[in-house]
Image: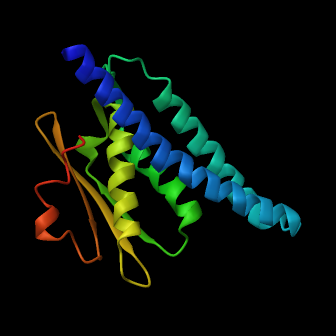
Amino acid sequence: CNDKRRLLLKERQFSYIRHEVIKPLVSLSDRMAIAIDEKDTLQFKPFKNCIDKIINASDTLLAADSEFNIDRTECNVQELIQSVIEIYGTVYRNVKWSVNVDEQVDKQLLDKRGMLMVISNIIDNAIKYNDKAIPEILVSCVGKDNLFEMKITDNGPGIEKRYLKKIFISY
């Protein structure tokens, strides 16, 4: 029974990755093709860089072993956040980003792959469901006693109450 559940969870995760990673790759690939046709090399470069980063991230996620092991390593939280913002900032240029990370949070022992997925998903939703002309996203981290709290806030409409109990079921 645990094996069936593990396989189901694995398939759900891979399905999510294919939907959330591969779909944007196709869109970016189409935009690159247009840029190439127009011989607009200035527009081509940021899209190519973004695709390369997303491909690398998806390769890392899809290459993960089937046991869903949590691989805790020491990571620089500021760099982790900046890497996600760099990817989204290349595609969504009108977003106003703010990042505030306490010095106490500098390096943390965490599952880098899992944390990248969570941060990316929240930022993706903050952009996707934002109804403002210029989305504003603030990522802040405060630390205390070997723990840290990360908050990702935006100026969008928020989550409807009817969805609040369901939003973290996949995680």
Query: Left of 28 or right of it: where is 84?
Result: left
Horizontal and vertical percent for residue 101?
A: 29, 52
Reply above or below: 131 against 51: below
Location of the N terminus (image quadrant): top left
Residue appearing at x 35%, y 75% in the figure? 130
Horizontal and vertical percent for residue 99?
A: 35, 60
Of 16 and 116, nearer the camera is: 16
Reply above or below: 75 against 67: below
Reply above or below: 95 against 33: below
Query: Left of 44 or right of it: where is 170?
Result: left
Location of the C terminus (image quadrant): top left
Q: How many marks?
A: 0
Q: How is the image coloured?
A: rainbow
Image quadrant assignment for residue 125:
bottom left
Residue appearing at x 17%, y 71% in the figure? 160
Horizontal and vertical percent for residue 88?
A: 50, 59
